[in-house]
Amino acid sequence: MTHGRACAARIRERAAQEGWPLIHTAAQIVACCQVPPLRAWRLAHGMPLEEAARRLIELCAETGLRQPKLHKGDLSKYELGRTPVPVWMIDPLCRLYRARPDWLGFGGDYSEIPPGEEPENTRLATPFHTPFPLDKPDHGGHRKSQILPPLGIGGSDEMRRRELLHQLAVTTGLVLTSSHLVAIEQTRQRLHEATTGTGIPADILDRLEGLIPGYQRRFYELAPIPRLGALLTDFDEVTRWLGHRLPVMTQRRLWRVAAHLADLTVDTLSFLGQHREAAAWLATARMAADEAGDRPLATWVRAGQAAQASRQGDHTYALRHAQEAQAFARNPTPGLVFACGLEARAHACLGNEAAARAALDRAKDTLEQVPAHLQRSRLWGYPEHRLHGRISNVMTQLSHTHEARAAMPEVLRHYPRNSSTWIRTKLDQATCLIHDGDLDAGCAAALRTLLDLSPEYRTPLVLNRAREVLLLLPEKHRNRPAARELRDFLANPK
């Protein structure tokens, strides 16, 4: 039974007496008064509808956001779910109530942080979990559908999915929510559902194939989340055209585009620390490359499975995938060099120096046989400086700092500052300093690398790599000033 404002007032009074945090007050109002979270937060602040509507309008004006035409009746309908909340109003509502979107009922918190490791200000978030249904996987292991949670965005599920993808492409500083991840997964699944249709104009096919050179030119210039939004939007269009009945060669051309886009999506999701979603997209990229009949690309994607396992610290699995990719390749290609380099890293991480050096030697020999025009691709090629990056990383893992440093200048000279290879190499420099006993300089170098990055590039993957630098320090040295400064930054990256 829904209670009145008097009940909420009594809860607020008790909260003031006992010093409850605001989120606990809102949770108690949800539980006792049986009102939706959005209304509970307004009541927790003690705001009448008229005041909340007025302050929302004022807040939007002060911050330069879109101006809502809002009356108290409109806000009441939003709170009760009678009218969908426009997606652009979620941010103003969060600002007004000083809350996260999932606390207000827009999706849920599906993070997997172990108990006791949550940041202090989020430990009371559990009352606002909002699970969403998932259908069972089909025989191929793909989920037939995932339902977007009711975010308050109007229209069909398809419209909500597109709105979320558009939000990724245009919003700066956005944090990936569970709803975004569902939209990402739905976009991937559409490729598996493409079965019917009739033809594609030649100019559209040319434009879709032209997407790949465009990404090669500007991939490193796009911040991770806008890049992800653009990739998924383009992948969506390719998927729709693959639903048409097309000549076999036309289908293969589209499958090739889909494979490239899926592979770049894997790279971007991994950089954002979304490893589970990246693994699913890797399977899609592999399937698309196989459908395209493009063995060099399929080799590259199989090597990418080794790279993904390596990022997650599963070096035995990475070794297996790297060797499978080499067995799959028939001719010297960039993907084969990529696989040899990843085998070398896996051996190095497992402590087998002889096998790591042998794999690097195979990578060097293979690269000499790869045609020059295949080496030049910025994303799927393997020029010599890319091999230097692998050598530097493997030698850092083996603590051969002199050999690692000798390979680094070529990497840093050719790769853009925000690329994952540049970041990894800079952190390898910090690791080498620690291996050589210069502990303070190693911590300072890792911190300087993070500070040199734009905030949107300080992703979970990058921060975890920086934490690995800290873990190399002997226990007795982990409270040195330089180490504390790096640890403090990692606890609260700005």
Image: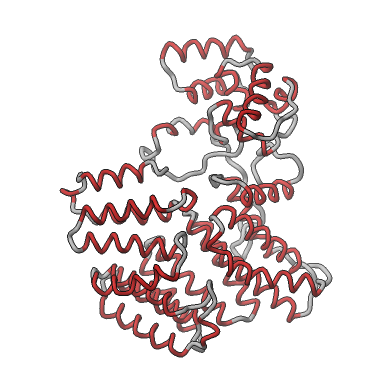
Q: What is the quadrant of the N terminus in the image?
A: top right
Vertical arrangement, residue 245 with respect to residue 482, above or below: below
- The percent coordinates of residue 363 (x first, y second) are 39, 82
Identify the residue shown where x is 64% and y is 42%. 149
- The percent coordinates of residue 180 (x first, y second) are 60, 48
Q: In the drawing, does residue 101 fall left or right of residue 196?
A: left
- The percent coordinates of residue 240 (x first, y second) are 75, 63
Q: In the drawing, does residue 409 fall left or right of residue 96?
A: left
Identify the residue shown where x is 64% and y is 22%. 55
Q: In the drawing, does residue 112 fall left or right of residue 347?
A: right
Whether residue 246 is visible? yes
Vertical arrangement, residue 253 with respect to residue 189, above or below: below
Vertical arrangement, residue 21 with respect to residue 429, above or below: above
Quick one: 187 or 362, which is closer to the camera?
362
Quick one: 343 or 283, which is closer to the camera?
343
Q: Indicate the quadrant where residue 75 lies.
A: top right
Vertical arrangement, residue 272 with respect to residue 43, above or below: below
Identify the residue shown where x is 58% and y is 57%. 227
Residue reaching furthest front?
413
Whether residue 136 is visible? no
| Number of numbered markers | 0
Q: Indicate the quadrant where residue 361 lies.
A: bottom left
Q: What is the quadrant of the C terminus in the image?
A: top left
Identify the residue shown where x is 68% and y is 71%. 210
**How was this image coloured?**
secondary structure
- The percent coordinates of residue 406 (x first, y second) are 29, 74
